Image (tube, rainbow, N blue to C red):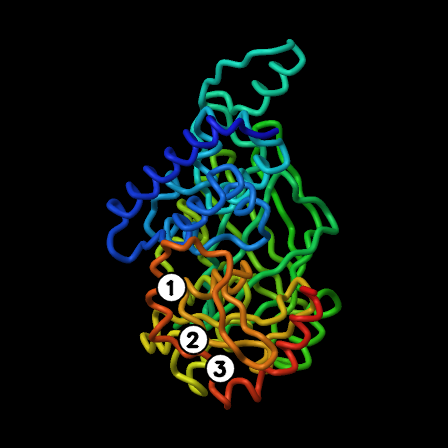
Amino acid sequence: MTMTPTEDDRFTRFLRDKSQEAKKQVGSGFGPNTFLGMLGSQGGYRTVVQLLSDKKVSNGFTNLLLAGRLDLSVEALVLESEWRRNFDTLLLKKAEARLNEANYQIRAIAIEVDGPEEHRQEQEGAVAQAGERPLTSTASLILRWPKCIEYLTLELDRLQPGFEFESVETLVDGSHPTTYSVRCVEVVRSPERHWSIVLAYDPSHGKNTAVAAKYGDSVEWGTLNISISSDLAVVTGAFEEVGAGEAVIPQITFVPTGLFSGMSRAQIEVLLRPDQGRLRKRLLESYGECVVSRECTEQALEAAHIVDHAVSGSSSEGNAILLRADLHTLFDRGMLRISVDGKIDLVRLPTNSRYHAERKNWNKVLPDKVLTAVRDALKARAAIRD
């Protein structure tokens, strides 16, 4: 599916207006400059296709999630408006999956559909009926154990025996995050949609061999029995350790607005990619500022991989640089480029972008210390992109 030039103009104005609304609602911490630049250079349709096709959610989505305004995200604006008819089913499902993961309730809409009956049924089937439960029920849980806190997300309608997924655990103060694998042993859903789930914490699967080697006998392995009510309002659980007698009863709570509610971006990165938080800390200690803009406000800085995880990039200082959050987005999208010899350049930005003026105060080349550390990664990135 696509848009006519006239439709794209209307759609672009719609997105631009919503972006300005988001800036007013969220406040000074939300700067949609990158998004507005994309709208100006390629229009609304291509911008949305690019954002929804990316494996990594945008910084804008994360900021809106933290502010509790996902209704102003690109994903929600497309799904909850007449414009959804212009996008193919695969992209709509990606948008829906992101919002479901954040426990955002997608609002039902009514769309007038023209065309053959077969096409009308396909379109109408894509729109959620008012009051109907989403296709996938996602339960984001926080389990408070005597000495630690565990973060667990279950896609209940997709869960089946043998399915393996990641869990993240930290000490009570949020430090020392550890990622390990949990396997579903049994899942039973009653006709009333009450879930009974058995999860196995076992050293033999997933990342747990490494966890067991690192922590030794201090790790408690066993099975967790979870019961979840049909309305996702009540959850209880009991952990039976291997070889132990009395079961441990953790305090389990739902996170109504998503796993990431009330957390900083740094905490989100720790939960999604635990190595990322440790890497960022090392980069802050080594360099202390954005390698491009020289920004030194810690809260504005992120660890940016040179060769992405998806292409076997490692979480090491030899494959990462410290970037300001918005420049991290440009770098990931190829709009800020760093050559093998460390030269920094902006490409594919509209001529009226304020970045061009700001760039006068940036580093023109990576500092020698940084370039020495990441030169091999820059070569690998250049080879992949060429």
Residue at 42% in and 86% down: 285
Which mark is on residue 146? none
Tell me if mark 2 has few (under 14), some (14-19) or many (20+) residues whose alpha carbon lies within 10 angstroms of its own. Answer: many
| Residue bearing the label numbered 3 | 366
Tell me the kind of residue under disc 2.
Val
Whether tag 3 and tag 1 are in contact, CB under 8 A, the answer is no
**Residue 209 point in image, percent of width and height:** 71, 74
Q: Is residue 176 visible?
A: no
Residue at 44% in and 75% down: 175
Which mark is on residue 292? 2
Query: What separation in Å lies between label 2 and label 3 (alpha carbons)?
Result: 7 Å
Question: Which quadrant holds the C terminus?
Answer: bottom right
| Mark nearer the N terminus (3 vs 1) | 1
In front of the other: 353 or 156:
353
Query: What separation in Å lies between label 3 and label 1 (alpha carbons)?
Result: 18 Å
Tell me the kind of residue under disc 1.
His
**Residue 302 point in image, percent of width and height:** 44, 70
Q: Residue furthest front?
A: 351
**Residue 59 point in image, percent of width and height:** 43, 56
| Residue bearing the label numbered 1 | 356
Q: Secondary structure at mark 2?
A: loop
Question: Which quadrant holds the N terminus?
Answer: top right
